Image (cartoon, rainbow, N blue to C red):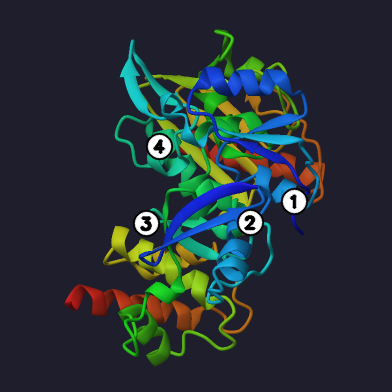
Amino acid sequence: MKPAPFSYHRPRTLAEALALLAEDPDAKPLAGGQSLVPMLNFRLARPSALVDLGAIDELVGIRVEDGAVVVGAMTRQWDLERSDAAHPLLRAALAFVGHTATRCRGTVGGSLVHADPTAELPVCAVALAAELVTSSGRTIPAEEFFVSVFTTALELGELLVEVRFPRAEGPWAFEEHAHRHGDFAVVCVAVAGERVAVGGVAPTPLSWDGGELEAIGDLYAPAGYKEQLARTLIARAREKVA
Amino acid sequence: MIDLAVTVNGRRYERRVEPRLLLSDFIRHELKLYGTHVGCEHGVCGACTVLLDGRPARSCLTLAVQADGRAIETVESLASGAELHPLQQAFHEQFGLQCGFCTPGILMSAKFFLEQNPAPTEEEVRAELAGHLCRCTGYASIVDSILAAADKLRAQ
């Protein structure tokens, strides 16, 4: 299990990275590599080139501005988890994302753009009504950013630059069931104030309005089990915020 | 091919490598440091964990070229000559290993973990160990080892 050959670029600026991606439609951006490198190892992904975003300082950092906490796309998950500025929901949910070693490498933007339907960060982004700012200057609400399984609203060659999490006061809760701590969730639920988002039941994080909840089953759990699990986790989360 | 310079266990190495070379293979095959073990090669088992600029990283989920200019610590960095690191000593005393395949990764994760949390609870140790697969011990003796190492390190 070794990656197929590819060429490698390590630009220092966002502009350089975008130029490299524009030149080659088969090139892939590399963030923290905690999802992409396994796919390379399995040869599920065979890009012609990798554009490593790891040396672009302008994509790293957490700042507070205009009532929002703005997180650079290449900020490591471990650093957001430990940031006093981060919403406590994010900090709690990040403890469920993989393991220490993967959170130290994995980035906030990488997880959002990977758009795994069971991943914690996309669910939190929807619950917190985050906005995703791209290299084309677009600002996309989280609910519109996630289009389908592993698919986002980003165009080919467009990069996520930063995520704006509105500063939300008030109660919050995060609940998850996974087969083993650190595994992908079977179902997870993020609650921030009135907003409830559910992961693992649909191709994208589901913004739940209190109505009927229909889940899609997968390899790990049938639909009915997931629906019951989601109802249980929502009830637990709501108990905490009540 | 890409030129690469890394510091591993305090020693500087320069090599020319293919971009697709994994850091785990670089450490083992290029540097001949066989202490870092390779289990699953997709980030699940934790055996290949090393410290990259002081933080744990799965070396099978890191390309060698991504480590350019950085400092790496492998399990070989722990002992000073014949004198074991307190973590290694604790694993020895508490029977924290049987076959030893998973041990190098666990030791490197535990080193960082105890730096962050010098007085962990058993529950916290168990949560941290979720990132490492051991098929011999049933984990009980590994938990004991890390708790004993925490005592040793605090006493230093």
* B122 and A148: which is toward the camera: A148
The kind of residue on which mark 3 rests is Gly
Q: Which of marks 3 and 2 is in front?
A: 2
SS of the residue at dot 2?
loop
A128 to the left or right of B54: right
Among numbered discs 1 and 4, the one appearing first in the sequence: 1
Q: Which quadrant holds the C terminus of chain A?
A: top left
Q: Which of marks 4 and 2 is in front?
A: 2
Question: Which residue is labeled 4 in the image?
Answer: A80
Question: Which residue is labeled 1 in the image?
Answer: A3
SS of the residue at dot 4?
helix
Q: Choose top left, top right, bottom left or bottom right for residue A28.
A: top right
Question: Which residue is labeled 2 in the image?
Answer: B22
Q: How far apart are marks 3 and 4 (CA)?
A: 18 Å
Disc 1 chain ID: A
Q: Give how far across and how far down residue A71 sits, in percent.
A: 43, 26
Q: How far apart are marks 4 and 2 (CA)?
A: 27 Å
